[in-house]
Image (tube, rainbow, N blue to C red):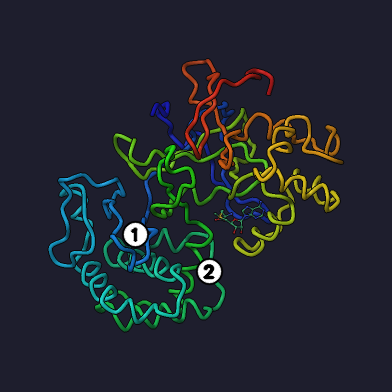
Amino acid sequence: MNDGGAKSETLLQVTEINGRGRSLVAAQPLRAGQVVLRESPLLLYSAFPFLSSPPPPYCDHCFRLLSQSAQRCQSCSLVSFCSPNCISSHTPWLCESLRRLHQSSSAAFADQSPERQVQARFLLSAYNLAAASPSDFQILLSLQGGGENGDSTSEFLHSLLSAVCPPLPVPISPELTAALLAKDKVNGFGLMEPFAVTNEKRSVRAYGIYPKTSFLNHDCLPNACRFDYVDSASDGNTDIIIRMIHDVPQGREVCLSYFPVNMNYSSRQERLLDDYGFRCECDRCKVESSWSEDENEDMEEMDGEDDEEEEGVGEGCGDGVDDDSSFPHAYFFARYMCEKENCFGTLAPLPPKGHDVSRLLECNVCGSVKEDEVVGNA
Ligand SMILES: C[S@@+](CC[C@H](N)C(=O)[O-])C[C@H]1O[C@@H](n2cnc3c(N)ncnc32)[C@H](O)[C@@H]1O
């Protein structure tokens, strides 16, 4: 994909904003469709439980779909790789830990949800990073999240992994395990299965943590969104790409939405408080906090359960939410929300060519591309 040779340092500046922590701010005017950040993950881990059968058909390093020539690890026989380069990432510690954990996983995870196994995979990757690349591990530790005491999940995972895995050259305390899990919760991005007609309900293939992308704060009406091109990227298969949805002046904060934009006010607030520890006071929340329950339910119906309401989004989303003053952000939904049923993706223009903003909008979930009917009238 053409990313216009983005140099994020000249486009985005890390700035501390009161009440929001580190934030990324436009260091120059940014244009609709512009790639403002492209980066590789600090750490990646499979979204599949240990006990999934058959084993996931992906390279355990770059998470590409494996071909016939895939190489299975001869020692643990649990993971496969697409190339000698990828297999070199499989350290002896990780290999032995995976083998031992897999052996004990039926008993160890018997009473646990499959999510625990995925969290254990994250911890193995994080511990492995601590030993294999201490400087990257320090970057991981510097990300937001942690500080709180461990809970029963972190205690369970810490005792299990310390009992099962071979010793590491670096000490891992229960507090460190708790902090790592908290950082994953706040900063992890899911890399989805590529969209296909036969795979409309896309699942997550892997999770990744991206150092600079982790500085992007949330806004319920984002001005940027993330793309990935798993299986279709010529290199950097798991790179994350941040593109501007519309023009933004210098000095304005660049924000993502941490979840699909169609969620209603109370669901958004609940999610942000539970998972990210803050109350959102963005412009959209200020408007929607005064809506009645019915009006908020109308927003819920935009999630595709009611097609008639969904079609009405451009004109306002139903009873009571039908004019510009009560629903000033209607334009966003009409222009930048994917119309495909059950997609809920966000649209951003393709990267500009020269001075021209693209007339084509791409969905960051299903990948469909459509003509922008209002280009130039942002
Ligand atoms: C992925 S991090 C973003 C970078 C973070 N501000 C930092 O200092 O590293 C997510 C965290 O940033 C903060 N945050 C994100 N969006 C926010 C917002 N709209 N208002 C207040 N805090 C926000 C919350 O603490 C959240 O858990």
Q: Dot 1 surroundings within 10 Å: few (below 14), some, or many (20 or more)?
A: few
Q: Which residue is drawn at 43% across and 43% down?
A: 199
Q: Quadrant of the C terminus?
A: top right
Report which residue position mark 2 lands on: 146
Q: What element carries label 1?
A: helix
Q: Which residue is drawn at 58% across and 50% down?
A: 258
Q: What residue type is labelled 1?
A: Ser
Q: In which quarter of the image is the N terminus?
A: top left
| Outermost residue, top side | 355
Quadrant of the picture in which ligand 1 is shown: bottom right
**Badge 1 residue CB within 8 Å of ligand 1:** no
Q: Where is residue 14 in the image (x, y as percent from the top left)?
A: 54, 46
Separation of marks 1 and 2 at Cα, in angstroms: 19 Å
- Left or right: 367, with 289 as reference point: left
In the displayed structure, would residue 223 be above or below residue 267? above
Report which residue position mark 1 lands on: 135
Q: Dot 2 surroundings within 10 Å: few (below 14), some, or many (20 or more)?
A: many
Q: What residue type is labelled 2?
A: Gly
Q: What element carries label 2?
A: loop
Q: Where is residue 188 in the image (x, y as percent from the top left)?
A: 47, 56
| Outermost residue, left side | 74
Residue 375's disc is none
Q: Position of residue 340 (x, y in %)?
A: 57, 35
